[in-house]
Image: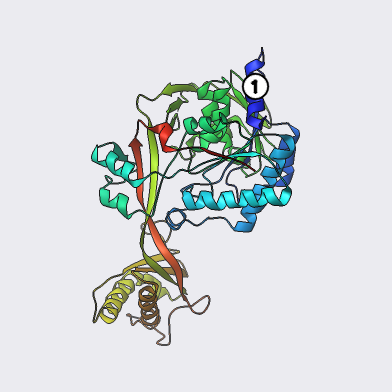
Amino acid sequence: MSATGRILKEFSSSSGRRPLRLLGASGQLGYGIPSPAFNAGLERKPDLIGCDMGSIDIGPYYLGSGSMATARESTKRDLRKVLVAARKHDIPLVIGSAGSAGAAPHLKQTLELVREIAREQDLKFRLAFIPGDIPKDIVVDAVRAGGVRGIDGMPDLTVNDVEASAQIVGQMGMSSFRQAFEADIDVLIAGRACDTAIFSTLPVMLGFPVGLSVHMAKIIECASLCCLPGGRDSILATLDDEGFTLESMAPQRRATPISVAAHSLYEQNDPYVIIEPEGRAELHEAKYEEVDERRTRVSGAKWVEAPKHTIKIEGARRVGERAVVLCAAADPRFIEKREEIMRGISVVVRDLVCEDTEEDYSLYWRVYGVDGATARLPDTPLPAEIFLLIECIAPTAARASEVMRTMKQYLLHFGYEGRLSTGGNLAFPFTPPEVSVGTAYQFSVYHIMETDRLDELFPVTVEQL
């Protein structure tokens, strides 16, 4: 019998339901799992080990390119740690948003690592995996039917946006995970998924309240980030019919009522609502109560079924090849006249590199120390030095490099009022200061799509290793 089958059988045959223990091993698998906390969690005999592996926080590049954001060796190290532990203790292992962005290339790379580890460690188990990719024709049909809406100011999705996307994924929810659990498995690797589904599906199948299960899952998918001080150490949630208790497995971290409640703001437009494909958890009546100085108990979340199922869809498209120049300036006149200089250089470069061709590139200036991260407040004194990151996106790497090499030379010697040195007014951290950094992508799809085919969109495959 599989690890999930064992738990399902235990709870179906038990006259009284015991609390369920869920271990959030990693907030983003592949960046390291601190062993002391993880091992402490295993000593508490959890019923499930869960790991979130992806996010769109890392930007559109990884979704568009199919690359993993984490290094292969560190990813394999983390996978080995949780996989070996799960099989040693016969605990279900659930991983969501495989390989950073959860598209087909990411799932493939993750599964290759899992199979490699299984061979090396001589592990035997039933593995399920669920692709998160959404066929373009399904998205196009939804666009034409008016069943797609933008998120956070994204414009209406067009058929051209869909066709231009390198990858399109959808965040699967509990219904897809349930199909995998019902297949009698030990390990589940999912493509792009709701973070909550990793931890909420099994409790809901066992009869625990849906609202509590989803609220708990939303917190522990980030491991000990909800604690003081926040961190990535493993966290344990103990769930019963009335609420759940949170405890970091790192002794230096405390899950307090304030820190846990504040986590409701994390990645949420509305701190009182957690929206899922199948419905929403409402937190208006949620309570956060101190158990002791390191533990908090949470209760009160309610579940509301959605009248129509929806999924969040994400896509990225190539916009060109990127090159950057990195440099610094300490001349107060340069700093004062930076905007005038940047406008002048942009014109000079355009006239030179577009003398016999059209303007086919975009130039972006980021001045750190003044307005690189945030706009400078009025009347704020100018800094003694600034750092410039200038970016060019062009159709080819050669074209981007040409523009940046020309720009760098003329910026170095550009004449401006009050200039003291004609030999150069920039400092370069290394040479060459212009660097090609690969293909640039942007989010082309960041929308909500209505669907009446939720269970069909994410088919489950099971294999015996």
Q: For numbered disc 1, what is the local secondary structure?
A: helix
How many numbered dots are placed on residues in this image? 1
Q: Which colour scheme is used?
A: rainbow
Image coordinates for residue 148, horizontal then vertical, percent: 30, 39
The residue labelled by disc 1 is 9
Q: In this view, does 355 lie to the left or right of 314?
A: left
> Furthest-front residue in view?
464
Image coordinates for residue 161, horizontal then vertical, percent: 29, 51
Image coordinates for residue 314, horizontal then vertical, percent: 39, 46
> Furthest-bottom residue in view?
423
17 over 281 or under it: above or below? above
Looking at the rendering, which quadrant does residue 126 occupy? top right
Which quadrant of the figure contains the C terminus? top right
Which quadrant of the figure contains the N terminus? top right
Instruction: Evaluate whether residue 250 shows in this view.
Output: no
Between 124 and 57, which is closer to the camera in this rendering?
124
Instruction: Please tell me how crowded label 1 is: few (under 14), some (14-19), or many (20+) other residues with Cα within 10 Å.
Output: few
Between 355 and 107, which is closer to the camera in this rendering?
107
Instruction: Evaluate whether residue 52 shows in this view.
Output: yes
Image coordinates for residue 439, horizontal then vertical, percent: 42, 64
User: Mark 1 belongs to which amino acid?
Assistant: Lys
380 over 289 or under it: above or below? below
426 over 362 or under it: above or below? below
> Furthest-right residue in view?
43
Look at 63% across and 34% down and name the residue there.
255
